[in-house]
Image (cartoon, coloured by chain):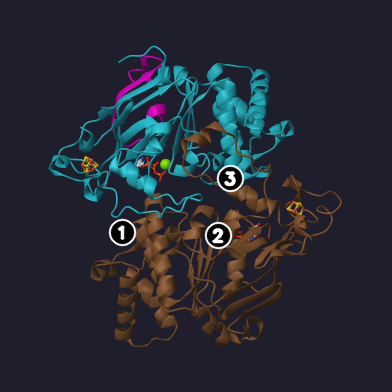
Amino acid sequence: MMNATQLLEVKNLKLHFRTQKGVVQAVDGVDLDLDFHRAVVILGESGCGKTSLSKAMLRLLPRNVAAYSGELLLKGRDVMPFTDEEYRQNVRWVSMSLVPQAAMNALNPVISVGEQVSEPAMLHLGLSKAEALGVAYKMFQHVGIPADFINRYPFELSGGMRQRVALAMALVTSPSLIILDEPTSALDLLTQANIMNVLKRIKLELGTSYILITHDIATSSELADEVAIMYAGQIVETGDAKDFFPAPLHPYSQMLMASVPRLRSESDPMFITGQPPSLMDPPTGCRFAARCPFRFEKCDEEPPVFQKGNRKVKCWLHQ
Amino acid sequence: MSTRIDEPVETLLSIQNLHVWYELRRLGFNVIGHVKAVNGVSFELGKGETVAVVGESGCGKSSLMKTILGLNIPTDGELSFEGKNLAKLNDAGLRDYRFEIGYVQQDPYGALPPFMNVEQILEEPLIISGVTNKTERLERIRKIMAEVKLHPVNDFLHKYPHMLSGGQQQRVVIARAMVLEPKMIVADEPVSMLDASVRVEILKLMHTLQEQHHLSVIYITHDLSTVKYFSARIFVMYAGSLVEKAETRRLLEYPLHPYTHALLAATSDPNAANAETYKSVPPGEPPSLADPPKGCRFHPRCSKALAGLCDVKEPPDFEPEPGHFVACWLYES
Ligand SMILES: Nc1ncnc2c1ncn2[C@@H]1O[C@H](COP(=O)(O)OP(=O)(O)OP(=O)(O)O)[C@@H](O)[C@H]1O
Ligand SMILES: Nc1ncnc2c1ncn2[C@@H]1O[C@H](COP(=O)(O)OP(=O)(O)OP(=O)(O)O)[C@@H](O)[C@H]1O
Ligand code: SF4
Ligand code: SF4
Ligand SMILES: [Mg+2]
Ligand SMILES: [Mg+2]
């Protein structure tokens, strides 16, 4: 159903890569919805396709793409048919920007951080250098970087400060949506907590929506309005964080949550035996079947997404 | 899941006032200062005892461990193992000492040589330590592989690291650390690079091995939530010093040092309510160890700092309750 206030609607998004050994189905039929001023967390383990999903949404594609298809509705308008030029002018950085994985280590070492942050505003919004620096300066305040850092170079900044710079760079064009790929996983605990506070404040102050991509389950709950669980290239469960955290529905989600060591409880964490399937040759039925304790005959067939109230789950148990 | 600590134990490792400073040189010539990576660390570790060293990146955890492993020479202080002072050991003694300690390093993906298969990786320490009989070596390799659950053993013997998952690679690293039957294991962030669903499996495996072999373990981590599953005591490290040392349960329930409070506050459990509040975390970042703050190294970030004291004088260890040590002026009685 179309909803006029919906910020983002992703339908059956696919991104496959060609390699010498075969086709990697990194993103394989992802559905995802997001409203304005909301944050969805995409949780999944290493290699399940999280970074590829962010690239598919921003159309930042490598050369070896084997398939790229689906619908991507931004404020109700499908942007997939856009030409690359239209995408660059209207979508990437303008409506939707990205803080890439390990962004803080990817800043240009020979350009001052102030200039780096203002660059997207010049490039995508057509601002003059002075105007763009003015906006950059404002963003520095939002992300908590002292004003006199504007002329410094990346190597003069700590990891936490560099991550704030990467965040300011994504914010400087005032996009409605920011995709954050593992924004805190390389940072220390206290620095991580400080960045999470910054993200929370920006969401309130600027009304930005987030797609937060991470494998860190505990930290993800710091920002999540909604949760999407990704497994082997697909989203297997989505729902409100308030419903999800106390009672995940999909067997994989349940086992993943049970694997989290907790500081404030005596629960004995469990682990999931086995490994995710190869994305080159995933099973035709449920992709979690080989590791699932609830598997039954039906599971040899791929489960569709079942709606349970306002939650969704891709598992035959919830038919 | 933690070891009993109420019975008296024999001391295995004893560390007194250990300092590890690295020289800072200008253009490779004159020394212009020091990185004070370990600054006055003291503790004792009993046979079969497990401790966790918890602290943020760059606080000196690896430097401390490398010194314990005999890879760094202490700038000052004393280190003894089974009553023998390491500084007084000759080369052969130091070599034997190294065989007593197994090392599980931080990054499983970088820890294994890519051109050696599992058998070769596990055989190497046996050859170096002088096990000359090939049959005996193979027997010991098979035994340890079964213990770390790399089975069926025959399937894994001839696999190369890139053919293994992260969890399997870490099992090989653990097997290599265990193959010489050491008395002590030093595990530097053994699970931080692994996926959530595998982490617990490796921690549980290490716990089982610890119990079965009555190993002493030093577990280095930045993740407080994994500590209680594994260690009887916790040492909290900040900027080169152990600022709090206590029994695990006690430290988690009754933390004393302001930095420990901050670490606990910053550690989340998955809970939707987290999104509704800001975390109270101290501002700033750990200091440079080349030029650490005077007095208490945490004072520029500490909301409880006592002006005129904390910024002037370094706090010694206080013991406000038996066995619970804290280096903070708030506990001077
Ligand atoms: N350009 C590419 N060509 C071929 N394969 C690729 C390419 N990019 C990614 N892959 C593969 O696609 C799969 C998904 O990778 P992706 O980086 O999206 O995972 P991820 O969930 O972000 O993992 P991580 O948590 O480790 O960052 C992996 O198997 C990866 O090796
Ligand atoms: N060989 C060396 N020469 C000079 N400085 C060093 C050397 N090794 C480490 N350091 C410095 O000593 C300090 C402590 O480093 P160490 O690796 O012990 O920290 P750590 O707690 O293990 O950090 P991490 O959690 O990132 O592994 C750091 O400032 C580091 O840069
Ligand atoms: S569809 Fe079947 S195999 Fe897949 S998660 Fe559900 S019960 Fe398990
Ligand atoms: S000694 Fe002072 S500055 Fe240091 S932690 Fe205690 S109160 Fe804070
Ligand atoms: Mg990724
Ligand atoms: Mg280290």
Determine the image quadrant of residue A268. bottom left
Query: Residue flagged by tag 3: what amino acid is it?
Result: Ala
Q: Is residue A61 magenta?
A: yes
Colour chain A appears in: cyan
Q: Which residue is mark 2?
A: B249
Q: Up-down: is A254 above or below B2?
A: above
Label 2: which secondary element: helix
Left or right: where B153 falls relative to B219: left
Residue sitting at x 42%, y 49%: A260
Q: Up-down: is A59 above or below B105?
A: above
Left or right: where A39 falls relative to A135: left
Q: Up-down: is B108 above or below B137?
A: above
Residue A271 image position (x, y, % from top left): 35, 54
Residue sitting at x 51%, y 51%: A263
Residue A188 visible at all: no
Indicate the chain coloured brown by its letter.
Answer: B
Q: Which residue is mark 1?
A: B163
- The tag earlier along the polypeptide, 1 or 3, is 1
Of residue B282 and residue A149, the one placed in the foreground of this image is B282
Query: Residue flagged by tag 1: what amino acid is it?
Result: Met
Q: Nearer the viewer, mark 1 or mark 2?
A: 2
Left or right: where A172 falls relative to A79: right
Q: Which residue is mark 3?
A: B266
Residue sitting at x 59%, y 49%: B264
**Displayed-image quarter of ligand 2:** bottom right
Disc 1 and disc 2 on one polypeptide chain: yes
Q: Are marks 3 and 2 in contact (CB under 8 Å)?
A: no
* Chain on which label 2 sits: B
Q: Which portion, as a residue range, is magenta?
A: A56-83
